[in-house]
Image (cartoon, rainbow, N blue to C red):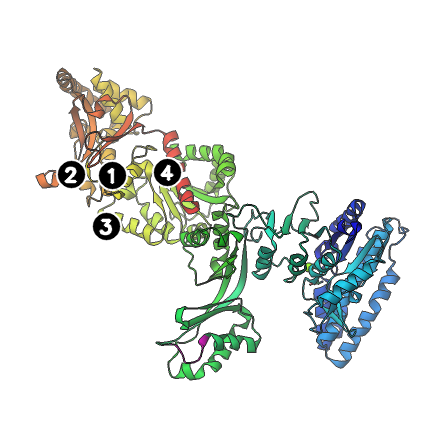
C-alpha cells in the first residue's frame, strides 16, 4: 500500500441522490470538497429510478409492448438530459454533455430493446446488458459534470475491473482476479475516476450485474483492493436508523454498528445495503460511513469492526411486512423421515425464500415465514409433498396465517447481556401483541418475532421506545377539564420538556372531552389553546350525543403504543367507558371514585377486565389526592402484612370544620366561611353527609380484600341527618345555626376530657367477629394519643395499623385536596403506567 492509497476515500452516490437536482449538486460539491483532502474514487448507481425502468422496459419489450417499452426509455433519457444540464447555467461550461451526446449513449439501448421486441424474449444475460446502461450513463454524466467543475475526471466502466461468474442478475465476484484488476487499473486513473457500480463481467466477456443495490458492493470491493481509509455511502437518509422512519417518527441514526450487525440488518428488512457489501470490509477492516447528502456535516452511521462501545444497547429494529406464516405439526410421534428437511426442500423446489424457520423440540412441528405473495404456491406444494401423511392423519392440517410481519431486533449486546429478549417480548406483551413465532439467530445478534401485520407498527413503536432509543409516546385522552383537569393540562405543559429530556417520556394530550363535546387530535392538541379548541368543537352541530368519547375514538386511541384515558370527572356511569377503553387496549387513570364504589359485582368485573386485557387501572388520587395511600396499602397487602385497622381523615372540608370547632368556633359560621372560600361542594350538605369519606373507606376496604359494598358503611353524618336533608341552602343554614349550640357544648365537654372532635373513617376487618360493622365513618372524639388529634386545617391523614406496624402505625399525612395536588397525583399515575413498560 502506498501513502497516497491509505489517504484514499471511496465515495458512493446512490440513484436517489443523483436523480434529484438538489442532491446531485450536493454530491458534486462533496466530491470537490473531499478531493481537496486526499485521493477519491467515486462510485455511482444509475440515476433515480433508471434501473427499475430498464427492468420494466426489458419486460415490456419481451412481451411485445413496444410503445410502453419506449416510453420507459424516454423517461430514462429525459432524466439523463436534465441531469447532464445541471450545471449548464449559460450552456457553455466545458465538460457538460450536450443532448446529442446523450442520445448517442442511449441509441444502442434502444436498438437492444428493439431486438428483444423482435425475438419476444429477454434472457437474464440480455437483461444484464440492458441494465448496464443505467450505470454507464450516470458515470459518464457525473464525470462530465465534475470535469465542468475543473476536476480531472473520467468515467470508469466496472465491467473491465470487476470479474464475476455468470449468475446473471446476481453474479458472484471472483475476488482475487477482481482485486488484481482494480489495482492495475487504478495506476492510470485520473484525479477523480467515476466508476459504474453494480456492473461486472465474466472472464470470457459476458456482462453481468451484482444484484440490486450492488453499487455498495462495488464501492467496498474497490476500497479493499486499494486499502482505502474509508468508504462513504452518500444517501438521502441520515444513516442507518433505529427503525423504519415511516413507522417510528423519531427513529434516529445509529452512531456505530459492527459489520456483523449491519449484515444482520440488511438481512432483516432494512434495505440499506447490498447483502455482500460488508464482505470486503470484514476482510480489509476498512470502515464504512453512511452519510446524509442533505446534511453533510452530520456524522451519519459508522460501520466498523468493533461496533458501538455501549454493549448494553440494542442497535436497531427492522420490520418486514407482507409475510405469511405456514405451520405443520405431527399428530403423535415423529415422522420416520425428517419433517423439517422435507418442509424446507418443498420451498427450495418452488424457489420460495424462507425468511425464518422454526423447528420445535423433537422435530414434531415446523413453521416457516415466507413472502405473502407465494403463500398459495407454498400451500399447494406442501399439500402435494405431504399428501400421504395428510390423508392418513399423521399430520395435522397445514395452518397458514397471513398477512404477518417479522419484527427483528438486532443487538450485538444480546449474546453478552441478559434481559434483551425479555424486554422485547415484555414490551410486546404489554400492548397485547401476541408473538406467533420466534427465532433467535445462533449469532445471538438478532431475534425475530412474527406478529400479525396489523400489530406490526404498534409492536415496532413500542419495542423501539422500550429500548430507550426514543421517547416513549404517552397519549392522554382527558375526560373532564374541570378544576383538576385543567390543572393537569397545565402541569403536562410545564413538565413536557423536562420529561422528554430527562425521562425519555413524551406526554401528549390527544383528546379532550366534557359533557358537551369532545376533540380528538392524534398528533396532539395545542395545550395552550385547549379551551378554544374544545369551544370550537362544541359548536360543531353533528356531534353524537352518546357520551363523552365515542367508542370508535377509543379504538383508534388503543392502537397507539401507550394510550391512557384520564377521568377527572366525578360522573356516575363512567365504568362503561372504562370497560370499552380496556377492551380497546387503553389504560385508565382516574380521579373519579364512583366506578370504584359500584356494587361488588360491577367493581369486580371492571378490575377483571383491566387484568384480562393487561391494561393498567390506576386511581391513587381517589383517596387523599396525591398522598401515597393506595400504593402504600397495596404494598402492605401484597407483602403479606395483616391489616388490623385503617383509620383516616379523608375529607378536607370536614377536617377543616372539626378543627375550627375544636378551637371554639360556631358551626354555621365555620361552614359558611368554608363555603365562601371554596372548600366545600356547591351544596355543603354533600360534605357534611360524609358520603365522600364513606366512598373512600370502601375503596380502601376493597384494596384490603374485603368484599363490601357502600351499604355496609355505618355512616354517621357530622350533624343530624335532618339538617342535611334540607335542600335549600337557606333552610340548611338556619338548621345548622339552631344546632350550633348543642355541637359547641359537645365539643367543649370533650375538650375538658382532653379530647378533640374529628371526622374519621375506620376499617376494622376483625369487627365482623364482634358482629360490628367493618367500616364506620362519622364524628369521633379522639384522645391526644391518637395521631389524628394533631391534624391541622384541611389535612388528610391515614394510619395503617398492621401486624408489622403494631406499635406505631404507618402514617401518611399531608394536603389531601385541591386541584394542584390531585392533578400531580394523576400525572404521576400516568407516568407510572409509562414507567412499568420501560423498566
Ligand atoms: N442501480 C442498481 C439498483 O438500483 C444498483 C444500485 O443502485 O446500487 O439496484
Ligand atoms: Mg440503490
| Disc 2 target residue | 774
Instruction: Kindly state the secondary structure of the residue where label 1 is placed.
Output: helix
* 413 relative to 131, above or below: above
Q: In front of the other: label 3 or label 1?
A: 1
Q: Which mark is residue 453?
A: none
Percent across and percent down for residue 134 are: 76, 64
- Residue lying farthest to the front in this orientation: 1
| Disc 3 target residue | 601
Q: Are marks 4 and 2 in contact (CB under 8 Å)?
A: no
Magenta stretch, overall SS: loop
Instruction: Kindly state the secondary structure of the residue where label 3 is placed.
Output: helix
Q: Which mark is residue 568?
A: 4
Q: Earlier in the sequence, mark 4 or mark 1?
A: 4
- Residue lying farthest to the left in this orientation: 770
Which residue occupies the foreground of this view, 61 or 224?
Answer: 224
Q: Residue at x 48, y 45 (%)?
A: 472
Can residue 498 be spotted in the picture? yes
Amino acid at each position: 500500500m502506498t501513502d497516497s492509497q491509505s489517504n484514499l476515500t471511496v465515495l458512493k452516490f446512490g440513484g436517489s441522490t443523483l436523480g434529484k437536482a438538489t442532491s446531485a449538486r450536493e454530491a458534486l460539491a462533496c466530491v470537490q470538497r473531499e478531493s481537496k483532502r486526499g485521493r477519491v474514487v467515486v462510485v455511482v448507481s444509475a440515476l433515480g429510478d433508471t434501473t427499475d425502468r430498464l427492468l420494466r422496459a426489458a419486460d415490456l419489450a419481451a412481451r411485445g409492448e413496444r410503445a410502453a417499452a419506449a416510453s420507459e426509455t424516454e423517461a430514462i433519457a429525459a432524466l439523463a438530459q436534465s441531469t447532464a444540464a445541471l450545471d449548464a447555467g449559460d450552456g457553455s461550461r466545458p465538460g457538460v454533455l450536450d443532448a446529442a451526446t446523450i442520445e448517442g449513449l442511449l441509441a444502442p439501448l434502444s436498438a437492444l430493446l428493439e431486438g428483444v421486441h423482435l425475438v419476444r424474449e429477454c434472457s437474464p444475460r440480455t437483461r444484464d446488458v440492458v441494465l448496464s446502461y443505467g450505470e454507464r450513463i450516470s458515470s459518464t454524466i457525473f464525470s462530465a459534470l465534475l470535469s465542468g467543475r475543473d476536476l480531472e475526471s473520467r468515467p470508469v466502466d466496472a465491467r473491465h475491473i470487476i470479474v464475476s461468474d455468470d449468475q446473471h442478475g446476481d453474479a458472484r465476484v471472483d475476488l482475487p482476479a477482481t482485486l488484481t484488476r482494480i489495482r492495475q487499473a487504478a495506476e492510470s486513473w485520473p484525479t477523480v475516476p467515476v466508476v459504474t457500480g453494480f456492473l461486472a463481467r465474466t472472464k470470457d466477456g459476458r456482462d453481468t450485474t451484482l444484484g440490486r443495490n450492488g453499487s455498495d458492493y462495488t464501492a467496498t470491493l474497490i476500497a479493499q483492493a486499494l486499502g482505502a481509509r474509508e468508504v462513504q455511502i452518500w444517501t438521502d437518509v441520515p444513516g442507518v436508523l433505529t427503525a423504519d422512519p415511516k413507522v417510528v417518527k423519531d427513529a434516529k441514526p445509529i452512531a456505530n454498528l459492527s459489520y456483523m450487525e449491519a449484515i444482520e440488518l440488511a438481512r432483516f428488512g432494512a434495505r440499506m445495503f447490498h447483502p455482500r457489501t460488508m464482505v470486503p470490509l470484514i476482510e480489509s477492516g476498512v470502515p464504512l460511513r453512511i452519510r446524509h447528502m442533505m446534511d453533510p456535516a452530520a456524522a451519519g452511521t459508522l460501520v466498523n469492526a468493533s461496533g458501538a462501545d455501549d454493549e448494553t444497547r440494542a442497535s436497531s429494529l427492522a420490520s418486514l411486512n407482507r409475510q405469511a406464516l405456514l405451520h405443520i405439526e405431527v399428530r403423535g410421534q415423529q415422522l420416520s423421515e425428517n419433517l423439517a428437511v422435507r418442509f424446507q426442500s418443498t420451498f427450495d423446489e418452488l424457489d420460495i425464500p424462507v425468511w425464518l424457520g422454526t423447528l420445535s423440540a423433537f422435530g414434531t412441528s415446523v413453521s416457516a415465514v415466507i413472502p405473502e405473495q407465494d403463500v398459495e404456491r407454498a400451500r399447494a406444494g406442501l399439500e402435494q409433498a405431504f399428501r400421504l401423511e395428510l390423508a392418513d392423519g399423521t399430520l395435522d392440517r397445514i395452518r397458514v396465517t397471513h398477512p404477518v410481519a417479522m419484527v427483528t431486533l438486532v443487538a450485538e449486546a444480546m449474546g453478552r447481556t441478559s434481559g434483551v429478549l425479555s424486554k422485547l417480548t415484555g414490551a410486546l406483551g404489554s400492548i397485547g401483541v401476541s408473538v406467533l413465532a420466534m427465532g433467535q439467530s445462533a449469532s445471538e445478534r438478532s431475534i425475530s418475532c412474527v406478529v400479525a401485520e396489523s400489530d406490526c407498527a404498534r409492536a415496532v413503536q413500542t419495542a423501539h421506545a422500550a429500548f430507550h432509543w426514543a421517547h416513549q409516546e404517552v397519549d392522554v385522552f382527558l375526560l373532564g377539564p374541570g378544576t383538576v383537569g385543567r390543572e393537569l393540562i397545565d402541569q403536562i405543559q410545564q413538565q413536557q420538556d423536562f420529561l422528554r429530556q430527562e425521562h425519555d417520556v413524551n406526554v401528549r394530550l390527544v383528546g379532550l372531552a366534557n359533557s358537551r363535546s369532545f376533540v380528538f387530535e392524534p398528533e396532539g392538541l395545542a395545550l395552550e389553546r385547549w379551551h378554544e379548541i374544545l369551544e370550537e368543537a362544541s359548536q360543531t352541530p353533528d356531534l353524537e350525543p352518546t357520551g363523552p368519547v365515542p367508542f370508535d375514538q377509543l379504538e383508534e386511541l388503543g392502537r397507539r403504543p401507550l394510550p391512557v384515558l384520564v377521568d377527572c370527572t366525578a360522573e356516575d356511569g363512567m365504568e362503561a367507558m372504562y370497560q370499552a377503553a380496556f377492551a380497546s387496549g387503553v389504560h385508565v387513570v382516574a380521579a373519579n371514585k364512583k366506578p370504584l364504589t359500584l356494587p361488588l359485582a360491577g367493581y369486580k368485573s371492571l378490575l377483571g377486565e383491566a387484568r384480562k386485557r393487561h391494561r393498567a387501572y390506576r386511581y391513587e388520587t381517589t383517596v387523599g389526592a396525591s398522598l401515597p395511600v393506595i400504593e402504600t396499602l397495596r404494598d402492605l397487602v401484597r407483602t403479606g402484612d395483616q391489616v388490623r385497622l385503617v383509620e383516616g381523615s379523608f375529607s378536607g372540608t370536614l377536617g377543616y370544620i372539626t378543627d375550627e370547632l375544636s378551637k371554639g368556633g360556631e358551626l354555621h359560621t365555620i361552614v359558611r366561611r368554608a363555603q365562601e372560600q371554596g372548600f366545600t361542594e356547591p351544596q355543603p350538605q354533600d360534605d357534611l353527609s360524609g358520603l365522600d369519606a364513606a366512598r373512600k373507606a370502601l375503596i380502601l376496604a376493597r384494596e384490603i380484600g374485603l368484599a363490601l359494598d357502600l351499604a355496609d358503611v355505618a355512616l354517621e353524618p357530622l350533624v343530624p341527618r335532618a339538617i342535611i336533608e334540607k335542600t335549600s341552602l337557606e333552610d340548611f343554614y338556619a338548621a345548622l345555626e339552631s344546632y350550633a349550640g348543642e355541637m359547641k357544648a359537645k365539643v367543649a365537654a370533650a375538650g375538658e376530657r382532653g379530647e378533640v372532635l374529628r371526622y374519621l373513617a375506620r376499617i376494622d376487618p376483625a369487627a365482623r367477629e364482634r358482629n360490628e360493622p367493618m367500616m364506620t365513618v362519622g364524628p369521633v372524639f379522639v384522645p391526644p394519643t391518637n395521631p389524628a388529634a394533631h391534624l391541622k386545617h384541611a389535612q388528610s391523614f391515614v394510619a395503617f395499623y398492621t401486624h408489622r406496624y403494631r406499635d406505631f402505625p404507618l402514617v401518611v399525612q399531608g394536603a389531601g385536596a385541591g386541584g394542584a395536588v390531585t392533578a400531580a397525583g394523576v400525572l404521576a399515575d400516568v407516568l407510572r403506567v409509562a414507567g412499568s413498560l420501560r423498566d
